[in-house]
Amino acid sequence: MTDTITYRDALHDAHREALEADDRVLVMGEDVADYGGTYAVTKGLHEEFGRARVRNTPLSESGFVGAGIGAALGGLRPIVEVMTVNFSLLALDQIVNTAATYLHMSGGQFNVPVVIRMATGAGRQLAAQHSHSLEAWYAHVPGLRVVAPATVTDARWMLASALDDPDPVIMFEHAALYASKGELSDGGGPVDLDRAAIRRPGSDITICAWGGTLSKALEAAEELGSDGIEAEVIDLRTLRPLDDATIVQSVMRTNRAVVVDEGWRSVGLSAEISARITEQCFYHLDAPVGRVCSAEVPIPYPSHLEQAALPQVPAVVAAAKAAMNR
Amino acid sequence: MTAALPAIETTVRLLGDMIRIRVMEERCAELYQQTKIRGFLHLAIGEEAVSTGVVSRLQPDDAVVATYREHGHALVKGIDAARIMAEMYGKVEGCSGGRGGSMHLFDADHRFYGGNAIVGGHLPLAVGLGLADDMLDGHRATACFFGEGAMAEGEFHEAMNLAALWDTPTLFVCENNLYAMGTSLESSESETNLAVKAAAYNLPAWSVDGMDVVAVAEATDRALTSIRGGGGPVFLEAKTYRFRAHSMFDPDLYRSKDEIERWKERDPIVTFTDRLIEAGHIDAEGIEQLWAGARAEMDDAVAFAEAGTWEPVERLTTNVYRRTPSSGHPAPETERGQV
C-alpha cells in the first residue's frame, strides 16, 4: 500500500516523529514557530511540543547555528533550520571552524551531533541572493556529512538517520521540491547515509544527480529511452562522503557518465565526481565524462534568464547523446 | 577599593594557582626557544588573576569555554599539568591527544571546551552549552572567556543577544588586556567602557580589577550566585594586561616599555604575595614552598611530555568522524584520508 504526500509534509512528519521520539531533540531557527517555518516544514509543531523545543531565533545565523552546536555538545540533539544556503554563509565559521573541527581538535573527545537543514537552489525567480546551490562548499570539508534528500521517501526518513549520526550533518532541501508530491511506501525506515541509490536502472550511460536535479535526470532518461538509450540514474543522496562504489560499479557497466549539477561548473561537485570517475574508471570509459551545470553567472531574476542559467532536461539529453556519439 | 581577604586556605590556594600558571608559562617560553613547542604560543603572563579568580570559583561540572590563551584556565580547571604540557609538545598523551597544541586544549572529564582560536567564534557555543544545561534541568554554569578584541566581532553581539533572550546560565568573562594583538582598545571599540556596551543586551554587567585575584573571585561568586539563581547570563570585564607579546612571533612594537613597566608594578602575583605576607596568611618560607612546588610540578610535566609518544602517521585520518563512513574514496597508499 502506498500513500501520496508532499516533500514538505514528509519533512514535517519526520520532525514530528523526531520530537516525539527523543526529548533531547529540539528544532531551532528563524520563524520555525508561529510562522511555521519559511517553507512550512515545522508548522504547528510549537503548539504540540512547546516553544522551548520548537524555538524561534533572532536573525543571527552565526549565533543560533553556533548555539545549536553548543547545545549538541551539551547533550541535546538540535535540528537547526537555516532559511537558505545563501544565508548559511553567515554561519560558515560555526560550521567549518567549529562543528567540523571539534572532534579532531579534541583528540576524539567532543563529537557534535547536530543536524543543520537548509534550502538550496533556484527556480522561483528569487534572484542572486536566494537561489544559489552551494552544497559543494560544505562537501569540501572533512568532518561534515552532507546529505540531500531528493524524494519524498528520503525527506521522510533521512532526518532520523541524520539525528542518529554522531557527527554534524548538513541537509540540503531543494526549494523547488517542497511542493512536489510522491508516493511514500509503507514500512519505510532508516536511510543508509553512506549509500547512493540507483533510481532507474540502465545499461548504456550513467547519469549522476541529486536533490533538485534528480527529477530532471529521470525525465531526460525517459526521453533517452524513447530513443533507444537506456540511462542508469544515480541519486547520490549523500554528497560527503561520496559513494564512489555505487558510481564506479555503474560506470564500469555503462562505460559512459554525465553529471547533472545545479552548482556552477568551476571547482564544484560535478568536477569532483568527474575526477573520481576518471581516476577509477579511466580504461573503461568510452567517452569523456559529461557535465551539465548552471551557467557561470549569479542567478538572474527574469524567468527566461533564470531558466537559461539552470541545467535543463534537453541539455542532459544532449550531453548523454554526445557521450553516446549520437 | 581592595576586597577583604577570604580565609587562609583560599588565599594560599589562589596564590599557589597563579604561581603554577606563571611557572608553567615561563617554562613554555623556554621550551619554545628550544623548539620543543611549535606553532602559535600565546602566554597570559600578567593575566593570571583572571583565569585563577574565575575558574577557581567554578564547580567541577561547570564548563569552561576559553580562547587560545588558555593554559592557565585549563590548569586551574584541574587538567593535569603533564597532559597540558604533552599537548603543547603534540604528543599522544596530551589532553587533546596531541592534535590541538597550545591553542586547542580540551578535556571532557573537566568539561573544558577549548582552546578556541577563531576570535569570538566560541561565544555562541557557550550559549548553546547553557541552553542544553537549562533544558536538561541542570544546575551547571558555563564560563566563557574572550578578549576585548572579540567584542568587535559580530558573534559577540549575536551570542550576548541570544544568551539574554534565553536566560542561559552563562558567565561571559572579557579579559580586557587593552590590545587585540597590536590594536589598542581605543582604536577598536566605539565605546571603550565595555560593561556599558555589554549592558545594552539587558544583562548584569560590571568591571573588576583583573590584577586582583580576590576581587575577581568575589565578582565571580556574585555572578555565579545570580546565574544559579536563574538570573540569566552575566558579563564581567576583568581589566588586565599581558606582560609578554601577543605570541612568540610578535615584536611588540605597538606599546611603550614604560607602559609595560607600569603594569608590571601591578603584577598580580607580586602584589598578592606582599598582601598575604602582610596579613600573616603566609610567610617567606611558605612562599618559597609554593614556587618550589610549582617548579617540581612543571619539571615532572616536562619530563612526561618528553617521554610521550608521537602518534603513528598511520592514524592520520582518525577522529575526523566519530562514526567512520563505510563509503568514500578508496585512497591510494600514498594519499590517505580521502572521503
Image: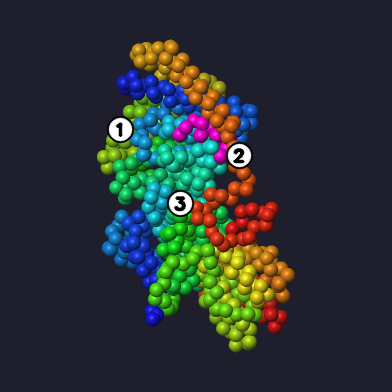
Which chain is indicated by disc 3?
A
- What count of labels does the image hold? 3
Labelled disc at residue B222: 1
At 73% from the left edge and 70% from the top edge, which residue is drawn? A283
At 55% from the left edge and 74% from the top edge, which residue is drawn? A198
Q: Within 10 angstroms of label 3, few (less than 14), some, or many (20 or more) residues?
A: many
Q: Is residue B100 magenta?
A: no
Establish if B288 lies above or below A72: above
Q: In the image shown, does A274 or B195 lie closer to the viewer?
A: A274
Labelled disc at residue B310: 2
At 49% from the left edge and 18% from the top edge, which residue is drawn? B292
Of the residues tagged 2 and 1, which is closer to the observer?
A: 2
Outermost residue on the left side: it is B229
As shown in the figure, which amino acid type bears the numbered disc 1?
Answer: Arg
Q: Within 10 angstroms of label 1, few (less than 14), some, or many (20 or more) residues?
A: few
Establish if A31 lies above or below B130: below
Report the span colored magenta. Answer: B79-92
